[in-house]
Amino acid sequence: MKTVLKAAAVAVAAMAAPLSVAAEAWMPEGPIKMLIAFRAGGGADTQARLIAEELEARHGWSVIPEQVPGKGGLNAVKAIIGEPGDGTAIAMIVTGSLGYNMAAARAGKPTDVTPIVTTAGTQMAVVALASKGWKTFDDVLDAARSGTPIRFGVMTPRLGDMVYVLEKRNDVDFNIVSLTGGKAVIDGLNAGDLDVGFGAGIQAKAVASGDMVELASALDEPLVSTPDAPLLRDFNLGFVSDTTFMFAGPKDMDPRARDAIANAIAEIVQDAASKPHVFINKAFGGPKVVMGDALATGIQQGYDDAGALMNAVNE
């Protein structure tokens, strides 16, 4: 799915500015409830609230953020399904909520909601302390093959499945440790409780200071900070992280409301002078804007890819 979203982002960036007229022409009938599928105070929550503030400042819309965390975004998905489709309710989730998380929980289909627009990806990488002496993921595999126990921290079930397939296909054994959130993984590395783990961008300062190294990219493209790191999917894996932040609305959402909100958010996150853009650049490696048919196609591909990953686990 990341390939579809990445290809579409270039075209959307070019068209976002002229389409912003639609945002000016449409007005919500009341305050817009913004359901946020993440805990308060984290990077995702901050991103959502900055976008809400900018929507109010630029368009005069009243936007009321509301936390609905839990179940990998599925709680927010369930909540948005019951809201009116007139544009007065939107939810910030990740594409994976409508992909692996929905497929694994058998909690419906992506078409149960209306995709609006994506805002940012992540810098999902396999990370370790620099003191380990490892330079790339090849070094981790060599250590595991030599009998060194490797405690591998993951923060989502999808990442856990990816590591499980990775170890099977590379004839190694990892001790997969499931944690809640990227901060817990980084804390585990710093405490010596983990040897490697996934970071979704929270590792940026430690990598910049030389305290940590990014050993592989879990994306389908190189990392911003460590472009020479290998792609994890090239280790006979074939799967990538599907974590891209996005907004969704209820099923059969009014197309005028959908397009106006999508264009307004796209304009904000791509405006280099806006606070959301600055924050997204710092925390998530830059904006990633996709909307319309390209987004719907990418989400469906992610849902199908989740089924393929779960089948690979059961091979």
Image (cartoon, grey):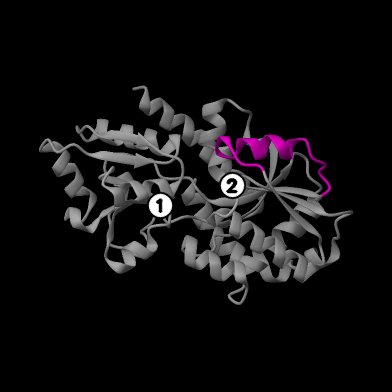
Residue depicted at 38% across the width and 33% down the height: 161
In the displayed structure image, the side of residue 235 where residue 258 appears, left or right: right
Q: Residue furthest left?
A: 146
Residue depicted at 64% across the width and 57% down the height: 48
Q: In which quarter of the image is residue 240?
A: top left
In the displayed structure image, the side of residue 279 where residue 225 appears, left or right: left
> Which region is colored magenta?
68-86
Callout 2: SS? loop
Which residue bears the numbered disc 1? 124
Q: How far apart are marks 2 and 1 (CA)?
A: 17 Å
**Residue 125 in picture, x, y percent from top left:** 36, 52
**Residue 308 in picture, x, y percent from top left:** 43, 31
Q: Which mark is residue 38?
A: 2
Does residue 65 show up?
yes
Kind of residue at disc 2: Phe
Q: Is residue 3 magenta?
A: no
Residue depicted at 66% across the width and 42% down the height: 68
Could you say which is closer to the camera, residue 82 or residue 22? Answer: 82
Q: Badge 2: few (under 14), some or many (20 or more) residues near its Cα, within 10 Å? A: many
Could you say which is closer to the camera, residue 70 or residue 215? Answer: 70
Kind of residue at disc 1: Met
For discs 2 and 1, the disc positioned in front in the rendered view: 2
Residue depicted at 46% across the width and 45% down the height: 181
Callout 1: SS? loop
